[in-house]
Amino acid sequence: MNRDSLSSLEMARLELNSEYLGISPQLLMENAGRAVADEIESRFKPNSKIMIFGGTGRNGGDGMVVARHLASMNYDVTFNLIGKEFDIKDKSTFLNWKSLKSMSMSIKRKIFQDSSLLIPVKADVIVDALLGVGAKGNLRQPLLGGVKCINDSNGFKISIDIPSGIDADTGKILGDYVNSDLTITFHGVKRGLNKAKKNIGEIKIKSIGIPKEAEIFTGPGDVKIIEKARPLESHKGDFGRLLIIGGSETYVGASAMAGLAALRTGLDLVCIASPEKTAYSISAISPNLITYKLKGDHLATDNLVQLKALLERTDAILLGPGLNLHKDTVEAVSKLFKTLNRLNKPTLIDADAIKIIGMENLKINFPAVLTPHSGEFETITGSKPSENLESRSKEVKNAAKRANSIIFLKSNIDIISDGNKVRLNRTGNPGMTVGGTGDVLSGIVGCLLAQGNDTFDSAVAGAFINGAAGDFVVEEKGLHIVPTDLIEQIPKVMNDPMSHKCLKIC
């Protein structure tokens, strides 16, 4: 991760993943506030006048922690809450507000529900804790009045994480912004600070205790950042159309399981293009799956004209489950790659399609995720993955760079890389060695791709979801599971990813 350019979503992901690892939001807030207080202590003497303007969200909670620590260091502290007390919904912020209310001897408190009552102040330090990195849209009252009051006040101005009124991702000014002398930002510089064209003063980065594991390992934060809100006016197809090309006279269930997993993940439409007899069998498995009957017993070049129209109408493609390695199929996939390179649509390549890439040395010039197990990895790279996790991670990273794709190596510790970043997934269990769990994974990731998510983010989130679903199954049934059991647990993971317990240790 580039800490010189953190988006608001990346920061939210890290915070949730930290919580999953046992680092509570309240502890992160405490560390953030203490870091700001320590910086102030290093610059200003005790008894200096400190005026803090805080909102009702987590940024305001950071400011409350600052107030508490500075008061204990013998500073003259006033905390101004800009907004209504009952608008404090965040648990950690509320607990810190409760603490401030009990400290009436050391901290002066004021509440401004009406911004017209705000008047400029004079202080040694003025702290902006109005809005954090999650703020979007133009500022409204009373926060807009709070920004104006800070700017009109006389004192050294410090913003917590980002100056209020600057979009943390785009650098856009949201109507007005705090003209800070110093911004103390956490863990890494927010993208908007690099993009802001206005004078935003000095920037200092402070650690708040986010562990490296929150960046390296998948977690609930990776699931949360790919969530899609469903407005009331939503229509069929708004949440993705996935085309699955797979199946053969021998393998019927693979494409069906992938399709059902995609639907459970939240996809609107799954279409499965399979040889005619296989397609009829898939239709019999579930009425939820739309099937297109391809002539013949296996995918062949004669099917490509029919597939072309389907490819153009879909949002993403899943190629490979149950495909087989018939001579005609190998030739068809080789020719199909020319179309995929032209269409440039996100595609997950699995199972026999991965083997064909290795056999035919096919070039990938479209957004692709490859999901090999160790044997398939050897087919496309020419060597088995190492036993050592660190060495294996480097091998996957190098393979992804060469393939111009996301490589998702399935193992007891999954490794996902785009050739630059590397993430590890430790959800899942030995019961998932049963055939078909990889097809469920493909369906999950295929759905996320079809919904317009980044290819790397889709693979990372899919790894967590698939493994966590398997863990929930084992909690209920032990290691006696079948792949369709995982499909029923997908909603549980997506609705509450934090309910999965981080148990596996590397």
Image: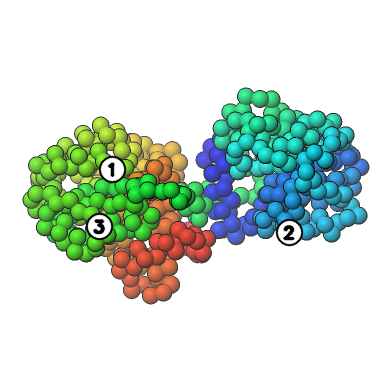
- Residue 106, image x and y in percent? 89, 52
Q: CA distance from mark 1 to mark 2?
A: 49 Å
Q: Amino acid at mark 2?
A: Leu
Q: CA distance from mark 1 to mark 3?
A: 15 Å
So how many labels did they put on this image?
A: 3
- Identify the secondary structure beneath mark 2: helix
- Identify the secondary structure beneath mark 1: loop
Q: CA distance from mark 2 to mark 3?
A: 49 Å
Q: Which mark is residue 314?
A: 1
Q: Which residue is mark 3?
A: 289
Residue 350 position (above or below residue 506):
above
What residue is rendered at 45% in x and 58% in y?
Answer: 494
Which of the 4 image quadrants contains residue 185? top right
What residue is rendered at 31% in x and 66% in y?
Answer: 484
**Are discs 2 and 3 less than 8 Å apart at CB?**
no
**Which one is earlier in the sequence, the residue at label 2 or at label 3?**
2
Residue 379 position (above or below residue 99):
above
Foreground disc of the pair 1, 2? 1
Q: Which mark is residue 95?
A: 2
Q: Answer left or right for 472 relative to 199.
A: left
Residue 297 appears in the picture as rendered: yes
